[in-house]
Each structure stands twice: as C-alpha cells, then as structure tokens.
Amino acid sequence: MKDMRIALPALWIFMVLNYLYCDVLSLFDPAVLRDVMAGHASGGTVQITPEFLLASSVLMEIPMAMILLTRVLGHTLSRWANVASAAFMIVVQIASLFVGTPASYYVFFTVVEVGTLVLIAALALRWTGVERGAVAAVAA
C-alpha cells in the first residue's frame, strides 16, 4: 500500500459498511425478529435495553472514529490506535459468535470482518511513516 493514511481509513470504511449491512440483514432474519418481538436477542441471552444499545453504539463508534483518527493523528499514535482498535474489535467480533446461535450470514460477515481487521493490524504494524510517494518526491 502506497499511503497508509488513505489505505487504513478505506479499510475501516469497508468494515463499517460490513457491520451495517450485516445488521440490516438481521432485520430480515425471522429468528432475530421473533426474539426482538419477544423482548430479547438471539437465544434469549441478551436483553435489548437502553444500556445494550449504548454499548453497541460505543462499539460501532470505534471503527467510525478510526476513519478520522488515522488521517489526523501523528504517525506513531495513529499506528498504535489502529493496532489496538483492530485487536479489540477482533475480540468483540469473535465473542459475538457465542451469543446465541449465529446464522450463516452472520458467520460469513464475521469471517470477512475479522480478516479485514487482521489486515488493518498487520498493515499498521508494518507502517513506517515514510510513504513511498514522499520518498520518490525527495529522491527526484
């Protein structure tokens, strides 16, 4: 990747879109709809409360904030914020598989999301702060 300040936010945008589309599909899942109408989430293990919705909002804000933070933070802070955020979101995403019985579409999105988060962490770890374009401009 030539410019991590473009590549990493693009990957975070990809993550947010996957999270959102998976949530939209869940609205059409008869099992999820039945559980929500009954007052609980998949398998009855999670109550949909204002506190649950706040926690979900905070979790979704992390990848959205990383889109901006990757562009505005200094290299070192941005690098480690990407690694830490990706690692945390990997744990959250994998843990979500153990809440009820996940549908096949949810497992599919989890594989895509975890793979993308691993890529974000790996790219951020390899990010030196010296962009190829900048090196070429200095050499010219």
Image: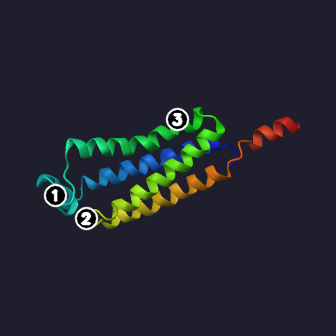
What amino acid type should be assigned to the residue bearing mark 3?
Answer: Leu
Please name whichever residue, 98 or 9, is drawn nearer the observer in this view of the structure: 98
Q: Are marks 2 and 1 in contact (CB under 8 Å)?
A: yes
Residue 61 sits in quarter: top left
Q: First in sequence, mark 2 or 3: give its number.
A: 3
- Please name the residue shown 44% across and 43% down the image: 62
Residues at marks 1 and 3, CA–CA distance in whole angstroms: 35 Å
Q: Which residue is mark 1?
A: 35
Query: What residue is at 32 percent from the left and 51 percent from the top?
Result: 23
> x and y percent of residue 33 in the render?
18, 55
Q: Is 61 positioned to the left or the right of 72 in the image?
A: left
Q: Are marks 2 and 3 in contact (CB under 8 Å)?
A: no
At mark 1, the secondary structure is helix
- One can see residue 49 in this view: yes
Q: CA distance from mark 2 to mark 3?
A: 33 Å
Residue 109 visible in the current orientation: no
Q: Is residue 107 above or below residue 14?
A: below
8 sits to left or right of 41: right
**Direction top: furthest residue:** 72
Give the labeled residue for mark 3: 68
Q: Which one is earlier in the sequence, the residue at label 1 or at label 3?
A: 1
The residue that disc 2 covers is 100
Q: For residue 69, what is the image quadrant?
A: top right
Residue type at numbered disc 2: Gly
Residue at the far right in the pictured view:
140
The quadrant in which the C terminus is found is top right
